[in-house]
Image: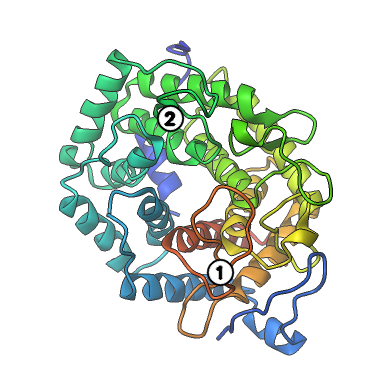
Amino acid sequence: MLSWSAAPLLGAAMAVALLAGAPASAAASTAGAPATAPAAERAATRAVTPAATLAVMQRVADWQLAHPSTYPEDDWTQAVGDAGMMALAGLSSDSRYRDAMVSMGRRNEWKLGPSMYHADDYAVGQTYAELYLKLRDPAMIAPMRAQFDYMLAHPREGSLNWITPGVLHRWAWCDSLFMGPPAWARLTAATGDHRYLDFAVANWWRTSDYLYDKEEHLYYRDSRFFKQREANGRKMFWGRGNGWVMGGLVRMLQFVPAGHPSRARFVQQFTQMSEKLLTLQQRDGMWRASLLDPASYPLQETSGTGLYTYALAYGVNEGLLDRARFAPAVAKAWDALVANVDADGKLTHVQPIGEDPKAFDPGSTDVYGVGAFLMAGSELHRMQARGAAK
């Protein structure tokens, strides 16, 4: 474990402060080409003010609340949607969004998912901890703390190779970096116990050392993809998979204090990946399901794009990324995302659950895509409020 007892713990007040905070569906467009929606229609969809951004966020959230997912409420898919609802709750004067999260936690009895060591099954703990930081009800984090204490006392060791028995009990796939580490980091903020953040940091870098391509500055989804190649001969890097990593980096940086010995390393990886992703954004503002072979998967994809928009906007807001280069990319990505919101608030062009680039129905939606959209909107709103988005 890392030791950083000399480093200042993120104060509760700072943690709470961190948490405060008529479009039509776009047709599919070819990779690198402008979106096919008429220019006047696209211009009309652009949320150019914080109020307009909040309005479209609320419309998307309201659609999701009116069309609830059928996944279990402790499932990772729901947990990502919850993260987005919490981001919206920090901006909206309407208490419905936070109330919905409190109601969800109570229905779950504040318990995590059924598989103790599986990162997907404790992703919902991120919302429990954030609610605790707001409302200070110890019941909200008690089951998570008991489970994490057990896991610390009974760690699951072993290879991250995908064929290894029990590999899902370790963070052996890039998605897990969004699902797992931020829950542990938030529990440290909630309790003051450094052990949880130490665990998150140590295991993040174990996964990074295994899955991060130091030449491409992108993550393989898991070890099965090390030698796989796209139709154009390039390495296979999944769009949403790297979106999970970028979102996970944001959600770690929010809770890794300035005095922590690994913070600089997190910042370095975040900026490396951001620079790479800036070069992979298509002319219509989106990223594709395959990052290095977008022509093979020309359909716009909103869940990965939402996660990238969230991360790049966060980087601009925190002074980690050059505003002159990245703020226009964020604004362009948000325009493209909003163009994929139907008039009733349904977010379209969400790649279904998977693990690699795939073709899919452009009308597809899912709660994790909504979560990514809402997180992106929250950081864009902050950027607009500071006058960074033009």
76, above or below 193, in the image: below
Residue positioned 25% across, 20% down in the render = 150
Indicate the secondary structure of the residue bearing disc 1. helix
Task: In this rendered view, identify the residue nearer to me: 189 or 62.
Answer: 62
Residue at 39% over, 59% down: 85
Corner quadrant of residue 13: top left
Q: Give the quadrant of the N terminus.
A: top left
Q: Position of residue 350 (x, y in %)?
A: 54, 65
Left or right, residue 335 beside residue 73: right
Residue under the point 51% across and 18% down: 159
Query: What amino acid does circle 1 point to?
Result: Pro
Q: Give the residue number, with chain letter if any, for mark 2.
A: 10
Residue at position x 51%, y 27% in the image: 163
Q: Amino acid at mark 2?
A: Leu
Q: Which residue carries the number 1 mark?
A: 50
Q: Position of residue 352 (x, y in %)?
A: 51, 60
Indicate the secondary structure of the residue bearing disc 2.
loop
Counting residues from the N terminus, which is met first, the one under dot 2 or under dot 1?
2
Q: Quadrant of residue 309?
A: bottom right
Give the camera-side residue of 83 and 216: 216
